[in-house]
Amino acid sequence: MASISKAEKAYIQSSLLSDPPLRADGRGLIDFRTIALESGIAPIANGSARVSIGKNAQDGGGGTEVVAAAKLEVESVGDGEDWTSCNDSSPTAYPLLSPNALDDLQHDMTSVLNATLSHPTIRPKNLGILPGRKSWLLNLDVIVFSDAGNIFDAIFMAARAALWDTKVPRTKSVQYRAKKGDRSDATQAMDMDVDETAHVGSALDTRQTIQVTDFELPDYWDEGEPLDGRQTWPVCLTLNLLPTLHFLDSTLQEEASVPLKLLVFYSFPLDATPMLRGMRLLGTGVSDLVQVKSLLKDGEKYARNVWVALEGKLKDEDLRRNKKARERFLNR
C-alpha cells in the first residue's frame, strides 16, 4: 500500500484525465500489465497455482505475486461447512503496516474471497464420500507475497486456477463383514467387500442389506477427477474510478490517487448468460446508481476478456500437468 503526497496525487489524476490519458508505464486505460500463471506448484496440495502481475522481465522482481493452494480433508457430515477459504499476507508484502493493520487487511481480503466463493450456488457437487457420513472438506489458502497493485484481481485469478487444478480423489465404498461361524471369532477374522452398487429389493426380500462402513482410495495415474463447477468460479475485475473515467490494473501509486474502486465478480457458464456473482465499492468516494449500472456493463466486457484468456491458459496447464502425471505413473 502506497502513501503519496497531495502533489503526487494531483499529478497522477491530471495525467489520467488528460487527452490522451497518460500512465507512468505507457499503458492505455484498459490495458493490463504482463500476467504469468503456473499451476501445480505445491506437490502436497490437491491443487495449487501462482499468479504474478507486472513482474520485471529482466530480473523477475517487482509486481504483484499471489499463491493459492487447495487441500482436501475427510470430515464427518454435520461437523461443519464443506468449504473454507482464508487469505494470508507475507509481512514483506506490506512492510510499512503494523501487525494490527496487517491483520485487518487480511480479514478484509478473506471476507471478500469467502463471501464470493462460499455461496451455495457455486459449491462443488462431487465432495461426497459416504452419503450422510463422510465428505471432503475443501480448504483454500491464498498467500500474498508481494503487492504492486490490483491485488484483488490477482487473488481471484490464483484462487480460480488452484480450484481448476484441484483433483478430487476417487473413492470406493467398503464394508467389513464377519466370516461365517462362531460369533466369538467375528472380531478376529473379517472380510472386506467393495460396495459397487446399492442393493434395492422388495419388501418381501429378507436378504441383509449391505451397509457401507468405510471407503478406500484406488490408485490412478491422474490422482482423481476434476473438482466440479469449473464454469461457476468467478473472476474479479477492479475498476478504478475518477469523475469522468475508469481504468484497469492500477499500480500502487494509481490506487492511492483514486477515491473509489468498484470490484465486480463475474462468471461465464457455457451456453448461459453471464452471471454477476457480487460487487463491492471500496474507498471514500461516492457513486450513483446510473454510474454503477454503466460500470457493470463495461465490467462484464472486461471480465469476459480476462475469463477467456485465463481459461485458455488453464487448459494449456491441464495438458502439461496430465502429460507429466501420466509419465510419472508409468515410470515408477
Image (cartoon, rainbow, N blue to C red):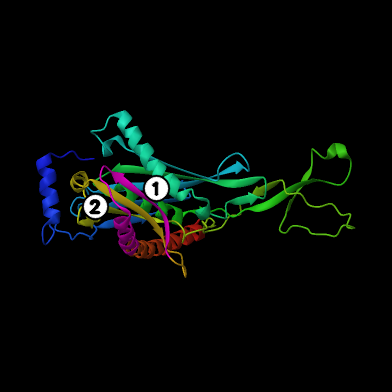
Which of the two labelled residues, at mark 2 and mark 1, occupies the earlier sequence position? 1
Q: Secondary structure at mark 2?
A: strand
Q: Which residue is at a point 41% across and 46% down the rendered structure image?
A: 113
Whether tag 2 and tag 1 are in contact, CB under 8 A, the answer is no
Point out the image quarter for the N terminus: top left
Give above or below for 106 relative to 48.
Answer: above
Where in the figure is residue 322, as x and y percent of width and height? 45, 61
Where in the figure is residue 9, as x and y percent of width and height? 14, 44
| Part of the protein shown in magenta | 274-303
Q: Which residue is mark 1?
A: 68
Side of 272 where 264 appears, left or right: left
Q: Amino acid at mark 2?
A: Leu
Q: Which residue is at a point 59% across and 42% down the rendered structure image?
A: 75
Q: Amino acid at mark 1?
A: Ala
219 falls in the magenta region: no
Res 43 seen here? no
Res 59 seen here? yes
